Image (cartoon, rainbow, N blue to C red):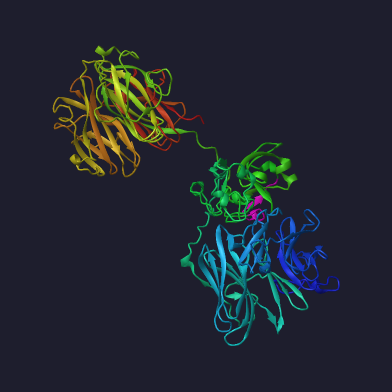
Amino acid sequence: MGGGPDELTYSGLDSEEEEVWGPSAYVVDHAGLNWIADGPGHKVLVINDEDTIVDRYELEGLVRGIEDIAVTETHLYVLAVGGVAPEIGRIGRNDVAPSAWESFPIPTDNLDPTEVTGLYQDASGVVSVELTFGRQHLPLFEADGAPIAAPGAPVSGYAIDGHQVTLVSHTGEPGQDLQTGSILVDGSEVASVETEGMIGDFFVIAEAPKGDLWVHASDVGINQEGALIARSLAYRFSLDGELVSLLEMPMTDELVWVEHRITMDPEGNLRVLSTGPDEATLRRPTSLDPMQPSIMPPGVAPYLPKRHPASFEAPTPAPQPDNLECLYREDIMQRAYEYANFVAVYNNNHMQTCPGRTPVSYFQEHLGQPIAGVAYKYAGYQEVSTYEHAVNNNFTIGDLNTKTDKVLDGCSHGVDCSGFVSKAWRCGHHYTGNLSEVSFELGSTDELGPGDALNKPYSHVRLVAEHLGAWGVKVVESTVGKDRMRVVVRDMSWASAGYAAGYTPIRLDNLCPDAPPPPPPSTHVVFDASGYIPANSSFVPIPPARLLDTREPGGEYEGQLATGQEIQVTVAGRAGMPAAPGLGAVVLNVAIAAPSERGFLAVYPDAPYPGTSNINFFTGEATPNLVLVDPGADGKIEMHHVITEGGSDVVVDAFGYFPPSADLTMVTPARVFDSRTAEFGAAMVLAGTRDIKLAGVGGIPETGVGAVIANVAVVNPADDGFATVYTAGQPQPTTSNLNYTAGQARANLVVIPVSANGFATLFTLENAHYVIDVQGYFEEGADFQPISPIRLRDTRVDDLGPLGHDSTITIAVDSAPTIPADAAAVFGNLTAVAPTQPGHLQVYTNATPDTSNVNFLGGKTVANAVLTALSNVGEIHVRATLPTP
């Protein structure tokens, strides 16, 4: 062992025990072993870092001379020169699967054999012949050693981290002009190197693990001052042209010629084999500061490249977990299953993804058919949404990974199992050999849980979905074999996936501690009362009863309503209500269920559609509203349904009725305010208050009105908020009638007393459009008594807390100072606040009904008006139904 801290010298390369005629090639394999080819001596030596020859390969009689070598996980390849044409020899590695030497001619259909200058092995292990010192290459062997059946034409440049890298040299007159080498990424120049002599070898040494690239250039010739120039250079660039590291070495030592062969080890660091007439030295440079190269003649300034970043948009790095953050198992598995469940159709465009690459048989057999788990450039697309967009738009230049290669991105690349796991782990790209940088080994496979992995370094890695006990494990993995290039979910035995198969259990360093189980689904409940039905009222409550559910067979109408469809629902004579002659207005809760798009529903007497609405709904949301409607002489009500596309289900529940003699008059629904129209300014109602006339318009008389029944709808609010409607001239209550979400439409029924001149005040927290339809009024009589709105229950501030599934609270309505103990029914607003899951609320007096009053989604606050009878002790019950925890 000799040299300084950056050197590893093997003195035996030219000793009595091991005579070496002339090292001609040098590479470092995936395990860090040094492979040195003695070209004239027809042998390859394998040397470890302890200065020991651990293996050797004799080539005498097989080849004419060794120009270059490549070493994969399974084979040694040699480029043989001399004779008519170069050829490739191959042998199985002695430490993996020894085999006899094989000889392969280099296809000459699309290349000139005299331009073959070396071998190139990409990050996936695919082996190519290099032409014209790296300006082009022709892939010939897959990573597993399988010859590529139809290599096609040589490929210009290199595919690195999803981008196409091309090197171009511009030579001027030797000794007069500077020589320039340009690095182009996706066709844009990102950096250039100028040399004094003649720029010689100019090629990519290797792709570094972080997506950088090592580039080699030699400068040989006479400069403008007539001096001899002989220097060997290595630069490490990021893809946007930033210089990361620099190494320069002289090619002469006191007029003795010295050759340098540069390669990269598995960690992305350079190793150099320097050979002179009497010695060969292995070096591992440890300090590669761009301004102070470690190996360089003293006093000689380095060639610093020029950067051209403006011409290239640097690739957006994949999101990295912050050191203070962590990933939950659920997040990891959600991402993994998104890739496995993604479906794409493999078409003729994808058949042309890359010259000389034959899609695996599975994809050829399923041409034009949906394929689950098809892989599309994991490194380029962190999220499945952008991944899906790219596939669906038929991006074809190396994007749809259906080929027999197994690396991350680019034209000659296919799916990479470690690339898939890296995306699920959000740790950048780590291959199987360096996953240890972001993970640690578990004590046994018994410790494995979802989101952990089984890693076989330098071979394959599987993401664990579920531990199946003594038999095996469920995994999500990138496949191998005939259907390679897909992400699949499969059960595997420990014999195939555990220690016996070479797999080690590992866990992401940034894995969050197992979170406690989530709290059970719940919702807060708020109830505000704004009126009551006196004991001597003619209002007749009934046990809540379902009159229609279009989701259930056997009803008056079955199936979803289409746009523009009108249906009739019989009310009279059902659920304890009298026949039509004895029936006045009915109290109903009408709900839209499972709408395929946004729309609205209007409820009115069996008469022509009046041009109003009661419910505004959005895609997928169950939306209820309280309706007071006079069924008319035939005892039926009419519903008019409008939807953008598709259909909706409708549910109708009855809660009571008024006889014709009641102090209640229903009118033909009429629109009395619409801020979207020119009549009312065609502008949003600004945050704050606005007075709106409700009496003396729309069939409501100017005088004799105790309270107006109206439907208030908010449309396209600027932000989340609420609205309150109250008597003009009175203090604003601390309650609300309507809760809304930004950009959506929501409606609710109000029964509101008006001022002496017929006005009510609308308060809105955010700018929004409002639409108000009047439907009737209570006279100043005994059937309805409005009160100043009062909050009777708010689980956010009392000791009970939110309601879980099948939980019930009791509200003592008669505890309100403005509601008498003998009140028959209460009118108010029931709100589900901050529900964690979808569900519904029911309001009732005695037995739990099969009806609902408020339907809600997780995370959305929803309010609905209710008019419900009181028990004989002045109470109502509210029950929450949520998913079972």
Is 633 above or below relative to 430?
above
Which quadrant would the N terminus be assigned to in this image? bottom right
Q: Which residues are magenta?
A: 431-443
Q: Residue at x 46, y 26 (%)?
A: 806
Q: Quadrant of residue 248?
A: bottom right
Q: Which image quarter: residue 161?
A: bottom right
Q: Position of residue 384 (x, y in %)?
A: 51, 46
Q: Position of residue 312 (x, y in %)?
A: 48, 64
Q: 590 or 396, which lies in front?
A: 396
Task: Answer whether residue 24 is visible to the viewer in this image.
Answer: yes
Residue 217, quarter of the rendered image: bottom right
In the displayed structure, does residue 588 sit left or right of residue 501? left
Q: Is residue 527 visible?
A: no
Where does the image place residue 27, in percent across and percent down from the top left?
A: 71, 65
Query: Which residue sits at x=41%, y=20%?
Result: 848
Verify whether residue 865 appears in magenta: no
Depth check: give the residue in front, 439 or 637: 637
Residue 277 to residue 640: above or below: below
Q: Is residue 411 above or below residue 854?
A: below
In the picture, measured across the screen, residue 815 lies left or right of residue 150, that is: left
